[in-house]
Amino acid sequence: MTEIVRGTWVVAYRELLRFVNERSRIISSMAFPLMFLVIFGAGFGQIIGSLAPGVDFIAFMYPGIVAQAVLTSSLFAGVSVVWDREFGFLREILVAPIGRTGIVLGKAIGATVTGLLQVVLMLILAPILGVELRLDIILELIPIVVILALGLSGLGILIASFMTSQQGFQLVIQLLIFPLIFLAGVFFPVDNVPDWLAVISKVNPLTYGVDAIRQIFLGTLPGIGVTISGHTVTLVEEVAIISGLSVLLLGSAVVAFNRRD
Amino acid sequence: MSENVIEVRTLRREFGKLVAVNDVSFEVGRGEVFGFLGPNGAGKTTTINMLCTLLKPSGGGATVNGFDVERQRSEVRRSIGLVFQQTTLDEYLTAEQNLRFHAYAYAVPADVREPRIRELLTMVELWDRRRGSVRTFSGGMKRRLEIARGLLHHPKVLFLDEPTLGLDPQTRRHIWDYLLRLREAENLTIFLTTQYLDEAEFANRIAIIDRGEIVALDTPDGLKRSIGGDLITFSTPNPEAGLAAVKERYRIEPTLRDGTIRFHVDGGDAFLPEFVRTFPQPIETVSLSRPSLDDVFLTLTGHEIRDSELDARQMLLQSGRWHR
């Protein structure tokens, strides 16, 4: 047990050290969501107008972009496993008396903390973008982000457990993960799209993570929530969905990582 | 406590149909420098990986520092330091950060940690570069840093898998100076694998491993003696007569290669002057050479340490396994 705890913190500590050491990564991780916000916001803002009373396109998209930043930074846990394998450092970790479960949890927590840091940076920008920010929003946001980030870093590590090369991992991310993100209702309300798209989006569990964050920012509004056979999914239900999913993904990651020779 | 810090009993590892390590048994004494000599794919790394708890044995067993490598993995891991063939440093951290990570992972007490880091970095002459990012280091510097890291948690056994592979001779010499000093200072046991025969000379005892089996185990001198002493090589205008004369006078079976006659004798230094003075045939050239471990390897296995196409394939297979 102490080995798992020590493993968790030492691996997480190193992930954060790496993040702080690599200033370019901090900048690039922020540049992507910011570009989406500024360019899409300016480009579509005028045409689209407001999606609900008092909600313009930037206000609608902002929570989605926050969720997306969490997703991409969480998946980095998997990137980091593949990197460590490729550059040899994984051996140093594997042969240390720390236990594999601790390694998985450490990677996940490391990615979660970097995800939170990115969310904080995004929150600082909120007033500039004209997004309303209140203390209760921030307090509700943090646990949701943590749950989402832990689960998605579990997904990243799970995939990384089966990958030996950076290229293979990138391929899976591009073919599987990016579509999941785009179909999670970051850029459009899933109730207002053609049926086929709505079905895919509602099956995609990430949709509920995105919508949970959006409900925290905007409250429950008609037309921009997720409706399943007449029932608009509530925040509590969404938290239950993403919590279950996170436990499943992180658990699978631990099992997969422990199995390897 | 047992005098043997490593005990290996009929250790075996198979990869599918391939037997990488075939029922190997040996012991290593405390404070010994023990060398595992063999070509690529002979089973050296596979054996080390089993002793380091990275790979499960298919049969047999081993203890390291009194702990079973299968049932007491954590205790074994705490007892050993490892320096692998390929670098396992985090290149994006500084030298100091790499060592600190290791100290945390091995639960080195806080009051020991910083003095120990300083002591080791000073010893491997990297103290000035402690804040330097590892990716700016040369191959030799990285290897020295890895050795320092492997020693950080006061291990009882330091495993070195091809410690100086790919380094220039000067750096190799340098690293060996450290290692031998360390053994003195820390009463450390050093277990190394190598395919460099001159590197194996640093060992107290050498196990020669070929195709998964130990074919000889002795001191370097013992191994050399086992193939029949010093080598005398001479040439004479009439080789046939020369061969006959050697056979008759010394009751030795000489060989003729490229027009020179060669044979082995014990105590070549004393033998040679007498030989030159009394040999009945005229001697054109004569030389005396000590047997090298190359000769030992060739004699014992029937092939040179470098020629092993099959072994290279075997190694690829093994490393593939590892990464999966």
Image (cartoon, coloured by chain):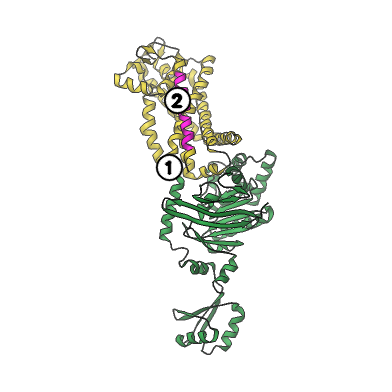
In the figure, the shade used to draw chain B is green
Marker disc for residue A164: 1
Q: Position of residue B125 (x, y in %)?
A: 63, 51
Marker disc for residue B113: none
Q: Secondary structure at mark 2?
A: helix
Q: Position of residue A171 (x, y in %)?
A: 37, 37
Instruction: Read off the magenta span.
Output: A238-257
**Residue A129 belongs to magenta span:** no
Q: Amino acid at mark 2?
A: Leu
Marker disc for residue A245: 2
Where B25 falls versus A223 (above or below)? below
* Contact (Cβ within 8 Å) of mark 1 with mark 2: no
Callout 1 and callout 2 share a chain: yes
In the figure, the shade used to draw chain A is yellow
Screen quadrant of the N terminus of chain A: top right
Where B250 falls versus A58 (above or below)? below
Name the residue rendered at 51%, 49% in the picture.
B57
Q: Residues within 10 Å of mark 2 (few under 14, many from 20)?
A: many
Q: Chain of mark 2?
A: A
Q: Nearer the viewer, residue B169 or B107?
A: B107
Q: Nearer the viewer, residue B1 or A238?
A: B1
Q: Amino acid at mark 1?
A: Thr
Q: Chain of mark 1?
A: A
